[in-house]
Amino acid sequence: MTYIITEACIGVKDRACVDVCPVDCIYEGDDQLYIHPDECIDCGACEPECPVTAIFPEEEVPDNMTAYIAKNKEAFNSPNPPGKPQR
Ligand code: SF4
């Protein structure tokens, strides 16, 4: 299981989640932030910090946003993977 960042993050990238993640597994892509599925320890600290409610536990991602589960995973296998968040 992992946490997933969904559509509401696109164009927002508030980054409040980044500050609370104990394992620094939230990365920044061009369009949104991404959680590395292998590094996330499922602590849940990021979820309430998101001002646009973009973060969900994998099994609670709303039905209309389940494509983001694959998007979060595939982002890290792309030629241009998400990097350390810019402040
Ligand atoms: Fe980081 Fe915890 Fe959120 Fe996973 S659930 S991204 S470990 S703050």
Image: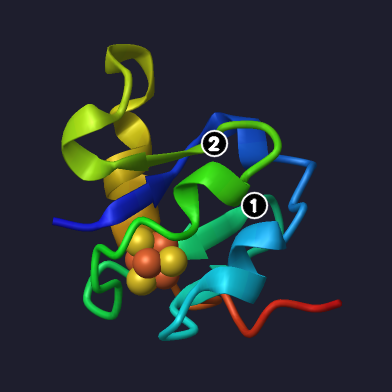
Q: Quadrant of the N terminus?
A: bottom left
Disc 2: which residue: 54
Counting residues from the start of the chain, the first of labels 1 and 2 encountered is: 1
Q: Quadrant of the C terminus?
A: bottom right
Of circles 1 and 2, the one toward us is 2
Q: Position of residue 60 (x, y in %)?
A: 24, 29
Q: Secondary structure at mark 1?
A: loop
**Residue 75's image quarter?**
bottom left
Would you say 3 lies left or right of 2 here?
right
Asked if disc 1 and disc 2 are in contact, CB closer than 8 Å, the reply is yes
Disc 1: which residue: 32
Vertical position of residue 27 compared to residue 32: above or below: below
Q: Which residue is depicted at the point 16% across and 35% down?
A: 59
Q: Secondary structure at mark 2?
A: loop
Q: Position of residue 81 (x, y in %)?
A: 51, 76
Vertical position of residue 46 compared to residue 71: above or below: below
